[in-house]
Image: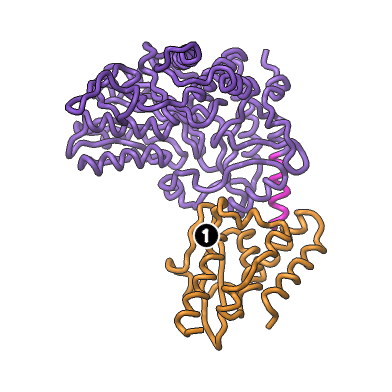
Chain colours: A orange, B purple
Amino acid sequence: MKSIEEIQHEIVEEFENLGDWVEKYNYLMELAKSLPPLDEKYRKKENLIEGCQSQVWLAAEYSDGKLYFQADSDALITKGIIALLLKVFSGQTPNDILNANIWFIDKIGLSAHLSPTRSNGLVSMLKQIRMYALAYKTKFNL
Amino acid sequence: MFDIQKVRNDFPLLQNTIYKRPVVYLDNAATTQKPRIVIDNTAEYLSKYNSNIHRGVHYLSEKMTEAYESARQTVKNFIGAAHHHEIIFTSGTTESINLVAFSFGEAFVEAGDEIVVSQMEHHSNIVPWQMLCERKNAHLKVLPITYTGELNMTALTSVVTNRTKLIAITHVSNSLGTINPIKEMIQFAHARSIPVLIDGAQGIQHQPVNVQELDCDFYVFSGHKIYGPTGIGVLYGKEKWLEKMPPYKGGGDMIKTVTFEKTIYNDLPFKFEAGTTNFIGAVGLATALRYLNDIGRADILKYEEELYSYALQKMQTIDYVRIIGTAEHKTSIISFLLQNIHPFDTGMMLDKMDIAVRTGNHCTQPLMKFFGIEGTVRVSFAFYNTIEEVDYLVESLKKVKQLFS
């Protein structure tokens, strides 16, 4: 498994090959469409992160010391960014998630989507990922 | 003669390029841009006359007080009120409604009484009444709407009862653009001695309003949606109601005498203007209203109507656009969905094409629920928008559709 740092570098490289915003968002939409569908058992209220603009579902599974995330959104662009976040975080250990410095969003010019003023559920999703990491870290004394 | 190019030049923000071209600002129902004269005038008052009103003996305070009271006069004339003391300056529509919900409620609403709102109201014209009803053990009743997005006027006779104490209804729907038959509503209510509050947040800037002709009991609106500054709004109330309503906030300037035993409240309008008011904002609002009068209200409204019917007709011909709200009488607002594309996605893409729109539920969740949707894309026009901008919007929607197919 690649480290969070390595994956961020990879994403940034991918985006550097893209031209204008049309290509960027086209790529995001492709990512969105390729995101594995959310297991229906997870599509429930407890996993829903409500934003004013779009909704996000997030579920976590813990196995062999690592956290695996599943997520979905009703908006395609939000879903594309979710796909990026899952690339980075899914399959990492709770400690690595908690210690991670996430810088790739800024670098690829999508930071507006993760600003607290945009209520699309992504900021809360990021917070929720860290909460899961903290919960499992505490539970298993990691 | 209405000169669109001259008008556009009056608004500095419209000259700005966000990404590639000057912004196509179609979020006017959220807030309007400010003409240079409002910006300059605000700066002038701040730099030459800033001083607290009604209190100082000095020259500056007198100048500022004069400007503030003259702003009240300008508002009074703009909406055709009978008296200047029927104009209360507030922070905006929301505060105006909260003021009436509290003060009217204190004076006139008892347990078991009813307040009537409609299904298309903005949360600001729902929640304050809910709070009042909770406080007084009263009931909130809802006038239903039809699938075209119009008030179901035939339901009025069953929703309004002899316990109804007030009807609060929007002039123009902020989500759909429907112009409600408020005059008819007021006549119906007055025949039963029920007062009516009109939420004019989306009405005042797009419809001629004369509160005496309408005979409404309250009319409320925000300054920032009619080309004035933020943080200033108006509550118009008939003297006969305002006189009987207790103050909403206590503080300075709203009193005549204060002892620890008893306070004698000041007269209208000061009774409702506790504390230091937004006097700079009031002057800015008056400047905006005078600006509209100088261009000519009738000309503005005529231009807006032409632009709107052009836009509506254009949008209606696009087969992948579903317009939400198809009332016969509409103005300035078009709410729609682009195929099955999420409104947020559409809005984000339009932003990249320098078009500013609003997406979401527009603070009307009950209305969205009625239509069975999460939200819409909303474009809302002002008199500085152009036919070319409408064409560009339509072209851009085509591009968005292609991007998502």
- Residue B131 shows up from this direction: yes
Please indicate whether residue B393 sits to the left or right of residue B294 in the image. right
Q: Is residue B44 above or below residue B131?
A: above
**Where is residue B240, by image quadrant?**
top left
Q: Which residue is located at x 58 percent, y 48 percent?
A: B337
Residue A15 location (% of width, % of height): 77, 63
Residue B399 covered by magenta stretch: yes
Q: Is A134 drawn above or below residue A74 in the view shown?
A: below
The amino acid pointed to by label 1 is Gln
User: Which chain contains the residue that carries disc 1?
Assistant: A
The quarter of the picture where residue B165 lies is top left
Q: Main secondary structure of the magenta part?
A: helix
Q: Is residue B229 above or below residue B376?
A: above
- Residues packed near mark 1 inside 10 Å, few (<14), some (14 to 19) or many (20 plus): many
- The picture places residue B17, in percent across and down from the top left corner, at 74, 38
Magenta segment includes B107:
no
Q: Residue at x 56, y 65 (%)?
A: A126
Horizontal side of residue A28 vs B206, given as left or right? right
- Residue range corresponding to the magenta coloring: B393-405
Q: Which residue is mark 1?
A: A55
Residue B181 seen from this side: no
Q: Position of residue B244 (x, y in %)?
A: 24, 22
Between B364 and B241, the one nearer to me in the picture: B241
How many numbered badges does the structure rendering display?
1
